[in-house]
Amino acid sequence: MSIEENLKYINGKLGKSTKLIAISKTKPVSLLKECYDAGQRRFGENKVQEMVEKQSQLPSDIEWHLVGHLQTNKVKYIASFVGMIHSVDSLKLLIEINKQAEKHQRIISCLLQIYIAKEETKFGLDETEVIALLNDASFSSLKNIRIAGVMGMATNTDDMNQVRNEFHQLKLLSEKLKNLYASEAHPFNEISMGMSSDYELAIAEGSTMVRVGSSIFGTR
């Protein structure tokens, strides 16, 4: 199927409460433009340099999502335009995002990355760490970031019961954090979970954002 047909199929599965982030890492600008022309406006990249290069070549109404691990020294390159950072896994990183957002007179939306997988290669905070971050005195002073919610990556496994359980645990933690910390400044409304292999399962478990690449663009 074409990119346009793939988008139509996936959007038909989303419903009204889930947003599609087209994960365009390693894909050429020509394919992103094809996706854009088919109506997609939210794109996700793993690497800062690749996002910066593509952002300069594509229409200005694209909402860019940084979904990969982000080093503090790279924040300055995307702070002027990034729509949302999904992969916030430390207070140190939040402080740097706030610093760079302030320079551009922006408020940058962020998701706290939660470790839900049974894999040591994944990044993220556990429940104790995320609560400690949100209770830290330094966090309350950050006025140029907005905690929109949480993000998680399930284990790379064929066991869909395990994946479902990991998504369910993230949903439960999201609700707990929202009840404890939600405010006008930090709404905690978003749950970013689900990729090409499991996005329908993620939607069933309450995902509000799915990060889909190969099901749109094809395999690398």
Image (cartoon, helix red, strand yellow):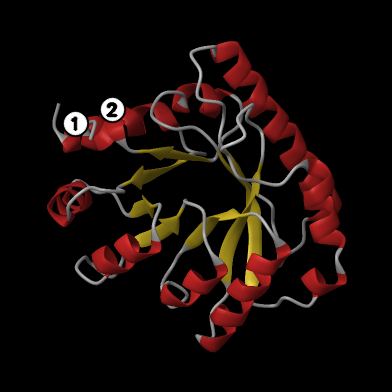
Q: Which mark is residue 5?
A: 1
* Residue 134 location, quadrant: bottom right
* Residue 214 location, quadrant: top left
Tell me the residue that label 2 is attached to.
9
- Work out which residue is located at the far front of the displayed protein and give it: 120
In the image, 115 versus 143, the foreground residue is 115
Camera sees residue 7: no
* Residue 8 location, quadrant: top left
In the image, 167 versus 4, the foreground residue is 167
**Residue 53 falls left or right of residue 151:** left
Question: Looking at the image, is 209 positioned above or below residue 181?
Answer: above
Q: Residue at x 22, y 52 (%)?
A: 36
Within 10 angstroms of label 1, few (less than 14), some, or many (20 or more) residues?
few
Q: Residue at x 19, y 68 (%)?
A: 57
User: Marks 1 and 2, Cα distance to the nearest angstrom?
Assistant: 6 Å
Q: Secondary structure at mark 2?
A: helix
